[in-house]
Amino acid sequence: MDAAAVGERSEAVRRGPVVVALSLAVLYALLVLPDHADRITVAGFLRLPAEAIAILALLLLTTGRWRRPAAVLAGASAGLAAVLKVADIAAFQAFARPFNPVLDFHLLGAAMNLLSGAIGPALAFAAAVAAVVATLAVMAVAILAALRVARAVGGLPRWPTLGLLAAAALAWAGMHAHGTKAAGRVPVAAYESARSLALHARWTAAAVGDLAAFEREAAVDALDGVPAERLFGTLRGKDVIVAFVESYGRTVIDNPLYAPAVTDALAAGGARLAAAGVGARSAFLTSPTVGGMSWLAHGTLLSGLWVDNQRRYDSLMVSDRMTLNRAFRDAGWRTVAVMPAITMAWPEGAFYGYDEIYPAAGLGYRGKPFNWVTMPDQYTWSALRRLELERADRRPVMAELALISSHAPWTPVPRLVPWQTVGDGTVFDAMAGEGDPPDVVWRDPDRVRLQFRLSVEYALETAVSYATSFDLENTVIVIVGDHQPAPLVTGEDAGRDVPVHILSGDPEVLRAVEGWGWTDGLLPAADAPVWQMDAFRDRFIEAFSPDLAGS
């Protein structure tokens, strides 16, 4: 052997322990990685993972040609668990729930659209590519690290090493049994990766089983066979508007970060409505979603079914379930959807039972977008009047509005203009360029929360302005939040409740809902009723359909 070869071999021998140590460190970090952002602390990584003991024991007990496949399996499992935990961190931040492999892959397209609106298409594409590369890199590094550890383990004395691992396992069991905690109240005995893999496998199986349960629920409907002429007798001749306000959650009423300003705005708005002869009643609904996926809330409220995941939503879309919209259409109303966030094909629209769908391109907006938000809420309200409510010789209209000015990234926030000046929306152009862009605002969580609060105040001010600027004697407006904003805004454990309001200039309308026990005005009391959102459809129909009494 020449001198160069001897030198290379000596260098490899010297590097061997370092490479093994690094491989062990990689596997250790992947195994103890937490699944919540607030648990990523020094104490969170100073733990004894049960999986490390199990992997080393597996590699010791497998010999010959079986050791390499065992190492690949161990490394792939550690890498997959780490990827799932990172996905959980992202899902908790966005939706206050873990990642579900079956239900959440469809969100990738929606996430890309939102990210493109916030940081631009090029950076969004780069971020997506980086995420894919990072995922593949984690898996590859985990497998390579496990293979390197397997080679090192092969040179250890088997039984003494197994004895040490048995002692470590006993120590782990003792710490787990006694609940030994490290600094920061983190359990020292860790099994994050095994728990993550087991939970995600269980959630995947549960998601498949849930679909069958949902189909059974959907097959039972109190409206089946009810003659259309018996519906909505109290509302004959009236326009009905159901307006979903994006990210309008109970947190704006309960959280001290937002409550002082928003509750004042609601109280003042209620006083303005009363002065204009418009009555209001308010309470809370529990939304099926948090932080996003607004379509689940829309489907839940309008169908009377609990639609809390995409599989349920997809199943609903191919069913013949009666929606609130379709019930109105069958009873003689013209049904329309005003959807400023719909910028692509929307085949789901056929399910709901609209006579007309107005996507973003069909609303005639010629102004500049407000980042992701295609047009301000005031323009959406104004477009409904221009396109439908100001028509001569028309039928009563049942309209569903998706109001999006309070959608992230919450910058810039529009301002109200006189209604007669809204026109084609170019009046808002100067506002669309004001303030810092999202990539600046989102560097500071306090600024994000401020912008969120201001956007909700704008959405509420716009709705109140509409209700007090136009005659509501023959109009009923339901204003409802679609979901709570993301945990970045609400904090942890904020719940899923959203405010709901019903407005009308006709006292008979409000008398029909006296039995609901809702709070008078726009500010729901702390003890106001809380319904699940899927209960709204039937209760609304029963309240305004006196001909159903006793049926």
Image: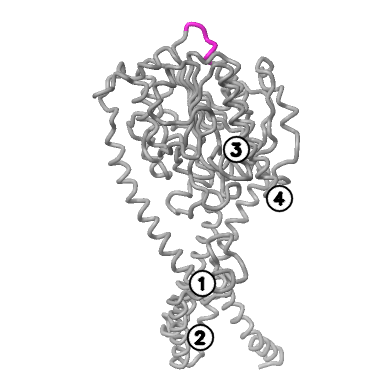
> What stretch of residues is rendered in magenta?
388-393
Q: Nearer the viewer, mark 1 or mark 2?
A: 1
Between disc 2 and disc 4, the foreground one is: 4
| Residue at left offset 36%, top offset 19% | 232
Q: Mark 1 points at which residue?
A: 187
Gap in Å between the C-alphas at discs 2 and 3? 54 Å
Q: What percent of the width, then of the height, locates residue 383?
A: 58, 20
Label 4 is placed on what type of residue? Arg
Would you say residue 390 sits in the magenta stretch?
yes
CB under 8 Å between discs 2 and 3: no
Tell whether label 4 touches label 2 (CB within 8 Å).
Answer: no
The disc label shown at residue 153, or none: 2
Quick check: 95 above or below 22?
Answer: above
Q: Name the residue under label 3.
A: 407
Residue holding disc 4:
443
Counting residues from the N terminus, which is met first, the one under dot 2 or under dot 3? 2
